[in-house]
Image: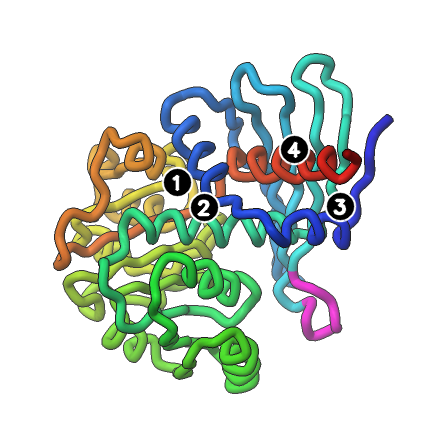
Amino acid sequence: MTRIIHLAQIKDICKNMDFGPLIEEGFAAYSAGRVVVPPVGEMSFAAPPGDTHIKYGYIRHDDCFVVKIASGFYENPLHGLPSNSGLLLVFSQKTGLLQTILLDEGYLTDVRTAVAGRIAAKYLAPQKVKAIGILGTGIQARLQALELRSLTPCRELVVWGRSKKSLEDYRTALEQEGFSVSTTREVAAVASTCTLIVSATPSTTPLLTAEQIRPGTHITAMGSDTPLKQELDPAILARADLVVADSISQCRERGEISKALAAGTLQEDEIIELGEIINGRVQGRTADDQITVADLTGVAVQDIQIAKAVCAGLGEEKE
């Protein structure tokens, strides 16, 4: 019989779990060619603005395969609704039968995305970080800061947002989590003070320019997960010493790398895959003055790994 698991139970299972090692294993398996991930299914909407992604795949010789549907409709908060929603379907890889429906309402997508940001920073961020820059004020912008707590002792945030209210709400929430938060509506203020920057917005025009980026800066760019979105000037990737993709094949079609390839500021043979660094085939940051960029578009193997962990947690609950 198919199990249907709702958000409250999913959160209860997740509260004491660290998904970092599992998702690192997933990236490593993906770059080693052990994961089957078809192209992303996608629908984009203009009025109101939003998008829905269908990501799916399986790890060879595993027990299950996963289909994930996740939506982001960015005007929903104006109507008292969450901007994100979704669910994951877990099927048996042996029979094709649907085993578990995880009605996570987009929660697991948020969590696995934030964990991927921490993993990218683990291998690419400078050792000493005086301030963390965050572009965006939404749920992902908050989760990214929280995930970085286990990686760096830095608790200074410089946060950019488009509205005073969203910035104040962000400040209130993150100060309750032990951060010192400075807010700004000038992106240049983030670049001038921070050497670890996370961009987590749905912007369709570049926010950061190449001349703003200081030597020694790492940027984790994760907002640009459709062909229409863009947060970075393509010239930033031309300046970077390391350009890292979660999936090279996926980043050809979406994300900051796709824009740089189209602009001619980057060649595909200059791109490294995150799993290759995790596997030890390629080095991550090797010098304090390097500029590094991680383009995270979200890969189905992350959904597979987090879904498997939650399902395993369900089994432990029964024991």
- Amino acid type indicated by mark 1: Asp
Which residue in the protein does label 1 denote? Answer: 246
Give the spatial CA distance, label 1 vs label 2: 7 Å
What residue would you read off at disc 3?
A: 103
Q: Is residue 275 above or below residue 35?
A: below
Q: Which residue bears the numbered disc 2?
A: 297
Tags 4 and 1 touching, CB below 8 Å: no
Residue lying at 56% horizontally and 77% vertically, measured from the top left? 173
Q: Is residue 96 visible?
A: yes
Q: Secondary structure at mark 2?
A: loop
Amino acid at dot 2:
Thr
Q: Indicate the secondary structure of the residue bearing disc 4.
A: strand
> The residue tagged with tag 1: helix, strand or loop?
loop
Q: Which residues are magenta?
A: 76-83
Is residue 77 within the magenta segment? yes
Instruction: Give residue 239's quadrant in the image.
Output: bottom left
- Residue at numbered disc 4: 67
Q: CA distance from mark 2 to mark 3?
A: 22 Å
Left or right of 67, for residue 102: right
Query: Which residue is depicted at the point 46% across and 61% down?
Result: 144
First in sequence: mark 2 or mark 4? 4
Kindly identify the residue that appears in the image at 27 percent across and 58 percent down: 218
Return the disc, 2 or 3, that comes first in the chain's sequence: 3
Residue in the foreground of this view, choosing between 83 and 115: 115
Residue at left 51%, top 67%?
A: 142
In terms of secondary structure, where does tag 3 sit? strand
Q: Could you tell me residue 254's position as x and y percent?
A: 43, 44
